[in-house]
Image (cartoon, rainbow, N blue to C red):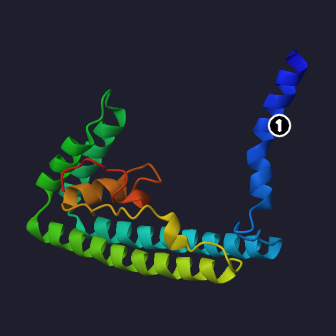
Amino acid sequence: MKNSILALALALGMMPLAALAQDTNAPPAMTDQQRQAMHQTFEQFAQQETQLHQQMRSQILSSLSPAHLRGIAATIGNLAIAQNPDMRAAAKRIDSLLSPGERQRIMAAHEAYRSQSRQLHEQMRSDMERVMPAGRPDMEKHQNGTTQRPPQDAGTIVLMALSPHPMMGMMHGHMMEGMPH
């Protein structure tokens, strides 16, 4: 009896796999050459995105006065060692340190970064779709359609761009979910 229940459970468990194997609508598998091309495209994209971020970071640093730079460094340092780091408060503190001219230059550098990054993402998507096998779903369909609003204040942008965590600056809009915009 135990063996027949086990066999039945095993057979029922294998049915979805058999159904998938017979699915004629399944997208074709990628070849090794296609995988390699996609990997190279992604690597190139990652390098270019890193360069864009470094360029924005450099522009932000050069737009700050030495006194404001020291104040921002102290705020980020305090955030790094805080028992309960408060990103919102740190961004507000940084924003309050900036002069109107610094804010304007930071916002312009961030907008240029976002524009170039958007173009880079579109190019990568186009390149990836070109190497995908025919019949594969478009990359657009894999995105959930939600877009994050960019930070609306210079303090948040400075915090993201100058933070010592390497991915923080790359996650504009994602890291600061819930931050005031």
Q: Is residue 57 left or right of residue 137?
A: left
Residue of label 1: 11
Between 45 and 55, the residue placed more toward the observer is 45
User: In what quadrant of the picture does the N terminus appear?
Assistant: top right
Residue 128 figure quarter: bottom right
Residue 106 figure quarter: bottom left
- Residue 134 position within the rendered picture, expressed as x and y whole percent measured from the top left: 69, 80
- Residue 11 position within the rendered picture, expressed as x and y whole percent measured from the top left: 83, 37
Who's the residue at 28% across and 74% down the image? 111
Who's the residue at 54% across and 77% down the image? 125
Identify the residue at the far top of this view.
1
Residue type for callout 1? Ala
- 10 Å crowding of disc 1: few (<14), some (14-19), many (20+): few
Who's the residue at 46% across and 54% down the image? 167
What is the secondary structure assignment of the residue under circle 1? Answer: helix
Who's the residue at 37% across and 54% down the image? 174
Q: Is residue 7 left or right of residue 48?
A: right
| Picture mark count | 1
Between 161 and 137, the residue placed more toward the observer is 137
User: In what quadrant of the picture does the C terminus appear?
Assistant: bottom left
Q: Is residue 13 left or right of residue 50?
A: right
